[in-house]
Image: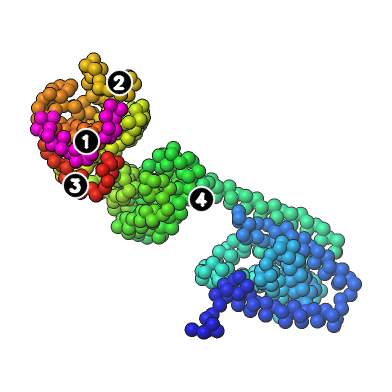
Amino acid sequence: MTESSVAPKTILGLPASLALYIGGVTAAATPVAVLAVAKIVMHPPTLGTALAVGLFFALTLIAELGPVPMDADGNSQVSISNVFIITVAILFGWKYAVPLAGLAIGIAISLARRDVMRILFNVSMFALAGLLAAVPVLVLGPAGDGHPLRLTVYILVGGTINLIGNAMIVSPAIALTEETSFREALVPGLRHSGAAFAIMSFLSALAANLWVLDAWLLVLLAGPLFTLTLYQRTALHSRIAARDARTDNLTGLGNHRAYQAALRAKIAESGRTGQPFSLCLVDLDNFKHINDTYGHPVGDDVLVRVSELLAAVDQGDAFRFGGDEFAVLVSHDELSAYREMERVQQRLARMDQISPEGPLTISAGIATYPSHAAEADALQRTADGALYWSKAHGKNRSCLYSPSVVRILTPREIELEAERNARLRAAKNLVRFVDARDPSTAMHSEIVSGLTEAIGLELGLEPGMVDDLRLGGLLHDIGKIGLPDAILRAPRSLTKEEYEIVKKHPEFGHSLLDGMGIDPVDDWVLHHHEHWDGSGYPSGLAGEEIPLGSRIILVADAFEAITADRPYRRAQSREAAIAELKAKAGTQFDPDAVDALERHLAKVHAPETVEAFA
């Protein structure tokens, strides 16, 4: 392919289509401006006309140098310069309005250090708008004797044509820049600026009539112009305040107030149209750990990343309640909403990892109106119940609400669950404190937790029990919080008296967990040192009298202890540990649990380090 056959993608840094459009507008405006200047040169104005046009030019320039912002970012602005441009076009003709408008905007934009293409476009657009404002004079002739009614009609018609022409010229440029349709650019532009342009048209009529009556009366126009400017700025501040009151400052998503309003509006719309929509409640998994470990700046970055993905959900409106809680209202049924949440989870998995623990994950609960609930509060409860199911079954997943799967909790049950979770978090922190007291057991509970889960999976236990096993493995040594450091860190075998003290830790751990609502985990902790032959403690249970969870924890605990360094001996190999467990299977250990651990280890292709099995 030759170089000449490849169409340039950009011209002067702009998309080719936009640059060509600007060139077309400039080409249309240039002969108009040249002709206007030629007519002025060929028929010079009188001194009075020159002074009058000069005054209006000065007012136009002042207005352009102080435009009123239309949005919070300053991307859209409007000035009252059109008041003077329209007045000049009707009173003195297009030949003065065209250069006056183009020159004033050109100076203002040049002083703002805009790029050349923007200067060209705005000068050309204003010049053409000045010509359009004079259409009533061009079509019907001069306003004549300056009768107020005739003059006012001329101004209003000229202002309307000026507004429409302005929008018709600007909208294609916006559409090309934002890659949207002409209509999508035109309609919002007319809606946002139409009122301001209408007011300016009436002020132009007032200015023209005051000028005709007595030029000095133009001073009276200062009051209405100041009022217009003040109104526009006040309206902008009100819009910004209303937006901020409904926007989360960090992510830019709607906040809880905006969510509640949008949810009820969505229900009303669905009632009219019959189209269902889905509510997706979303939690960021392990967010507190990210904040505590890596700091709030990293946590904020995580929230922004997640919010950007949720905001991009097809036909969805995303909101952040605060913390790590989000909601997305999706204009789809539950299956489509589920697929959208899956896409978000997949995109999160592909993102750069924040921490060594793995990629960011979210859990989501999805409920659909009206099939799952008939009003807002009920819909939120069903979605929240589905979210709770997702969090309770491993996280990093989405759950579609189903009465057969998800149980909706009462407010009292939610309160009790929150209290339980708070106590459970405190218990887990105590376990970490216990492990941290002895450097040789720094990760002991975490590793045992992973091994108990693996044994449970090998035994084919129910998912709920496997989850409990992981928790039991984590909490099994919580009772050691009551042991002295001298015993925990003893670089030797324990004396008989010290061993009797150690034997009390399962009972102490059970008492700490009692009342937390984590049955049967607390009983597993109590009996995790019972032996298959009845020689263990504290109750001397034997065989299947020992809870299955306790038997599994004992095997995982022993394996970790054998394969980890201790102050009184060095770590042994995986093979040696398995050999010792098998030798004591049927006396100290449950043979089935030992076999399950051996099968798990055989599947794991990793160096002989216990960390590989956690």
- Residue designated by label 1: 559
Q: Which of marks 2 and 4 is nearer the N terminus?
A: 4
Q: Do the residues labelled 1 and 4 touch (CB within 8 Å)?
A: no
Label placed on residue 252: 4
Which residue is painted at 64% across and 77% down in the image?
23
Label placed on residue 477: none
Classify residue 327 as left or right of residue 447: right
Q: Do the residues labelled 2 and 3 touch (CB within 8 Å)?
A: no
Label placed on residue 487: 2
- The alpha-carbon separation of the residues under discs 2 and 1 comes to 21 Å
Label 2 crowd bin: few (<14), some (14–19), many (20+), radius 10 Å: some
State which region is magenta.
564-588
Q: Which of marks 2 and 3 is nearer the N terminus?
A: 2
In the picture as drawn, the residue positioned furthest to the top comes out as: 497
Q: Does residue 542 show up magenta in the picture? A: no
Q: Does residue 566 show up magenta in the picture? A: yes
Tag nearer the camera, 1 or 4 = 1
Answer yes or no: is residue 499 visible. Answer: yes
Which three-letter amino acid code belongs to the residue tagged 3? Ala
- Image quadrant in which you'd find residue 502: top left
Classify residue 262 as left or right of residue 103: left
Label 1 crowd bin: few (<14), some (14–19), many (20+), radius 10 Å: many
Image: 466 above or below 524:
below
- The alpha-carbon separation of the residues under discs 3 and 4 comes to 50 Å
Q: Which of marks 3 and 4 is nearer the N terminus?
A: 4
Which residue is painted at 29% across and 30% down in the image?
566
